[in-house]
Image (cartoon, grey):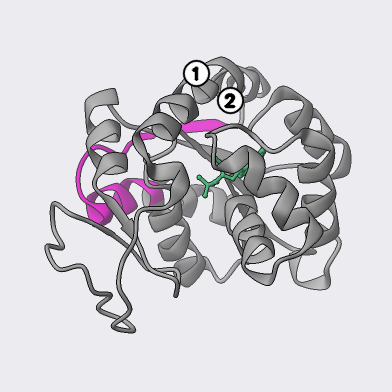
Amino acid sequence: MKIVLLGAPGAGKGSQAELITKEYGIPHISTGDAFRSNIKAGTEIGLYAKSFMDKGLLVPDEVTVKIVEARLSQGDCASGFMLDGFPRSLVQAEFLDKITALDCVLNISVPFDVILKRLSGRRSCSCGAIYNTDSHKSDSCLKCGNTLFIRDDDKEEAIKKRLEVYQAITAPLVDYYAQKGILSTVIGAETILDTFSLVKNTLDLVWKKG
Ligand code: AMP
């Protein structure tokens, strides 16, 4: 099963991706995670990507598609994968079409006010865990005990920019994939598990077909 998760920042793509990986056993490919691990490792790509990410901008297509191309050419992606946060532009979507055929693009749709609340309350841990101040009041990570922090791209100015960029550059992909007949939209306004039961209903059908 080859799927793409589409949705605005804060729509819950990362949380759904974790559950989808467990349920269907397909590799999870997140360009955001790939950039963050490059930043952590201090690579040239990481340094370059950070200058865009911190401002809430997209990392240029040329760099992003290379990362995805390299990852998709690895053996574990041959029979399926889930892309989370890629494609985010028409250029990236057209590139993906050239190298593979997708089974399903799952669009997680969440009302704007819910997105804003999620992003501004988001707290991250260096181990990769993510919390929201709504449900997690402490500033320590439950998994490793480290102190939580606000990602540079979760700061107010960057959030504004990310949402603008989403509307202008990424949202048109919803129509792009609808026209190809492979788009399924689920509403992701409730809890992670509520959304996952909708996601699972959709993906079970795709899984059976594949
Ligand atoms: P995410 O964790 O998916 O929200 O991604 C964090 C940041 O990484 C984004 O705000 C972008 O700056 C960058 N990024 C992730 N995926 C892409 C992509 N497909 N194209 C360009 N930039 C990306």
State the residue position of label 1: 167
Residue 16 disc label? none
Q: Residue 12 at x, y = what percent?
A: 37, 47
Vertical comparison of 177 with 118: above or below: above
Q: Label 2's element?
A: helix
Identity of the residue drawn at 13% across and 51% down? 134
Residue type at mark 1 is Gln
Q: Are marks 2 and 1 in contact (CB under 8 Å)?
A: yes
Residue 170 disc label? 2
Q: Is residue 194 visible?
A: yes
Check the picture and name the quadrant holding the N terminus.
Answer: bottom right
Label 1 Cα crowd, 10 Å radius (few <14 / some 14-19 / many 20+): few
Vertical comparison of 126 with 91: above or below: below
Q: Label 1's element?
A: helix
Q: Which residues are magenta?
A: 183-199
Q: Residue 207 at x, y = what percent?
A: 56, 56
Q: Residue 162 at x, y = what percent?
A: 48, 30
